[in-house]
Every structure is written in C-alpha cells, then in structure tokens.
Amino acid sequence: MSGMEGKELRVVGFLCNWCSYGGADTAGVSRFKQPTDLRIIRVPCSGRVDPLFVVKAFMEGADGVLVSGCHPRDCHYAEGNFYARRRLEVLKRFLPFMGIEPDRFAYTWVSASEGARWQKVVTDFTAQVHALGPRRAFGEGAGSGGTG
Ligand code: FES
C-alpha cells in the first residue's frame, strides 16, 4: 500500500491494450491488492503514446504518469514499444526542465499474464509518487506564493 494511507494522488496510466491492460485485468481478476490512485487510459500500443500526452497529463494536474506496454519483441505491432522506449527515455530527461521530478514518470513492460508483476509495478510506482507528494501546479514555483 502507499505511504499516504487514505490520501489518494492522481496517477495516470497509459496501458497498451494487448499486454499491460490485460496484465492489469489479470491482477484485478486475481484480486491482487493494488493502490487506488491509478486512472487507466487504454491505448492501442505504447508506441501510440506521444510524449505530449504525458506532459498534458501533468499540465492537467497528474501527480504521476506511468506508461506500460508489451515486453520488447512482444509488441502487437512489432516495434511500437521500441519507438515508445526511445521517445519516453528522451522525455524523461526533459522533465526536470519543465519542473517535474523524473521519479513522477515511469515506463515499463507488463504482459497480459503478469498480474503479479502488474501489482508490483503499480504498487512501487504509486509509492514512489507518494514519496514525492502532490505535485505543485505549473507556475506555482517557490516564492510565487499566494497574494491573499
Ligand atoms: Fe503493446 Fe505495442 S501492442 S506495446
């Protein structure tokens, strides 16, 4: 469970339809205990996740964003996850320039049969986001404070 019992954060998960969404479903059907912070957006493939989707999620108030697809060489579209990996790795390096801690973002691979792995991934990532706490909104930097 997360470090902030009873206090949910906003974690957005982009899950590929063919593997990770199935893995999350397997975890649910198996009744594995999971944090309730995650809001899942099902995408056809991790390669469909434009890095701007991640940025947009943060702009709209997400505290953390997780992308999960099929394992390398298991992508339903052959190489979508290879494109995803390249783009998301670059994105991860840019996040600090946008004032977003890199630990608020992760990408991983979970297959449809890996319900237990999904449980671990979502539990660990949610705990990581909880350790950082709620994210400050854009433009709410140190010293900007309220004007009451
Ligand atoms: Fe799952 Fe491409 S179909 S990552």
Image (cartoon, rainbow, N blue to C red):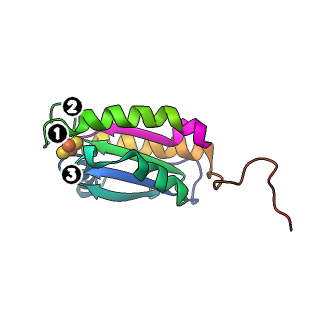
Residue 58: image location, x then y, percent: 52, 53
* Amino acid type indicated by mark 3: Gly
The magenta segment is 95-111
Residue 73: image location, x then y, percent: 16, 31
Dots 1, 3 in contact, CB < 8 A = no
Instruction: Check disc 3 and report the residue beneath it.
Output: 22
Residue 142 shown in magenta: no
Going from the N terminus, do you reach mark 2 or mark 3 first?
A: 3
Residue 100 shown in magenta: yes
* Amino acid type indicated by mark 1: Cys
- Spatial separation of the CA atoms under disc 2 and disc 3: 16 Å
Instruction: Check disc 1 and report the residue beneath it.
Output: 75
**Disc number for residue 13:** none
Residue at the spot x=51%, y=58% of the render? Answer: 10
Dots 2, 3 in contact, CB < 8 A = no
Instruction: Check disc 2 and report the residue beneath it.
Output: 72
